[in-house]
Amino acid sequence: MTSAAPKLSPEGSLFDESETRLIDRAFAAVTPVAPGDAATLRGLLGRINELSRLIESMPNLREPSSLAGEYRDGSTLIDHLCRSDGLSGDLDLPLKATMSRTLLVSKIHFFSAFVRVSASLGDRGGSYAALAHDLREELAQAIYTQLAEELLLALLRKPDVKDEIKREAADQLIAVWDNAELEIDDFCPMLESTWHARNRIAADLGSLLGTTEYFRLVCEDCAPQFLDFFARDEVSTAEKQAFEEFLFGMTYEELSTLRRAMREEGLDAVTSTWASRVLNRKIEHECAVGEIDPISLYRSYFRRQLAADFRIMAGTEGPSRTAEAYLMIFLLNQKAAERTGARPATGGEV
């Protein structure tokens, strides 16, 4: 985790250099064959740029100011964020933060729309399929950035997370909200690698041991630090449960239901079709037909996050955090220890 300094381009663009090149290439390919779609996309891009310029004109969130006789700066904002219980949602955030979050969602919508257009032209030749693939990769990175932001916000509302960890999370969020170009590879590349790998495997379920899924993560170059964290000797039961949720894209409760049904039906291995019937919901796949679906990964995270929040409120068994949250806490604790010179904890239960 790093608190990167703002690196906005002189033009204040939301998109970095590689994204800009890809967008130019995409417009050049789409405009001649689908001018109507290209015009729609250009209109969306124009509105995104307007929003980006508006946000750029707003003061830095750490800049000293006052309102109703109350002094404000970066430290008081961190204090405020650490006191938040999350029940007020974005209403509890600074205006620039909510607009920054809207800008990121707008970027996701833009890339998603471009993926749909380029994919619809795939029958015209391999160049459009390759273009759709490259756009989908950029869409995924934007979604991973959104996920990281949601993960940090989730830590702020957890009543059992230490204050120094919350302060590190709040500090990182402010850095993200103050810099529209900041992406997940700038401040948490380990999580990007983890989600990048998970987005490229489909859980087969099988015997629900997770062995196949684990080795597929290894083959997809998942960050070894992430895998080592959940394989260490002192890993807790809750951390193991959260890692299983991550592997299968299901909640602890859903996995318990499936294992119980397997025993009752005398099954040694199961399929997604069988699991869909037992759970009465469609089992989504983060990777299908050779292409990733980052929206499914996003939905998987939120399903697990909502379940973790419910367990804390209801006092039921199961992990109180997602696997990503356990890792994030570990990383933030290391960062806090570097600031103070204290010895960092070894797990994600702080």
Image: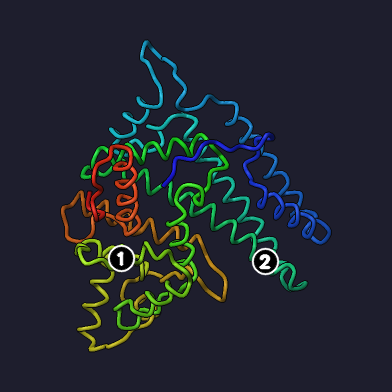
Q: Which comes before the other along the chain, label 1 or label 2?
A: 2
Residue 125, given in percent of the width and then of the height, sits at 76, 73
Mark 1 or 2, which is nearer the eye?
Answer: 1
Q: Residue at x 27, y 88 (%)?
A: 268
Q: Nearer the viewer, residue 65 or 229?
A: 229
Horizontal relation, residue 259 to residue 112: left or right? left
Horizontal relation, residue 237 to residue 181: left or right? left
**229 w.r.t. 331: above or below:** below
Horizontal relation, residue 43 to residue 55: left or right? right
Q: Counting other residues with Cα less than 10 Å from the Cα at mark 1, is it few (<14), some (14-19), or many (20 or more)?
A: many
Residue 281, given in percent of the width and then of the height, sits at 37, 69
**113 w.r.t. 173: above or below:** below
Which mark, residue 108?
none
Q: Counting other residues with Cα less than 10 Å from the Cα at mark 2, is it few (<14), some (14-19), or many (20 or more)?
A: some
Residue 128, given in percent of the width and then of the height, sits at 73, 67
Residue 104 lies in what quarter of the image? top right
What amino acid is found at the position of numbered circle 2 in the picture?
Ala
**109 w.r.t. 247: above or below:** above
Residue bearing mark 2: 119
Q: Residue at x 64, y 55 (%)?
A: 113
Q: Nearer the viewer, residue 130 or 282?
A: 130
| SS state under label 2 | helix
Which mark, residue 243?
1
Residue 106 lies in what quarter of the image? top right
Q: Residue at x 36, y 41 (%)?
A: 169
Q: Residue at x 47, y 34 (%)?
A: 97
Residue 4, given in percent of the width and then of the height, sits at 49, 40
Residue 70 lies in what quarter of the image? top left
Q: Nearer the viewer, residue 164 or 104?
A: 164
Q: CA distance from mark 1 to mark 2?
A: 33 Å
Horizontal relation, residue 288 to residue 72: left or right? right
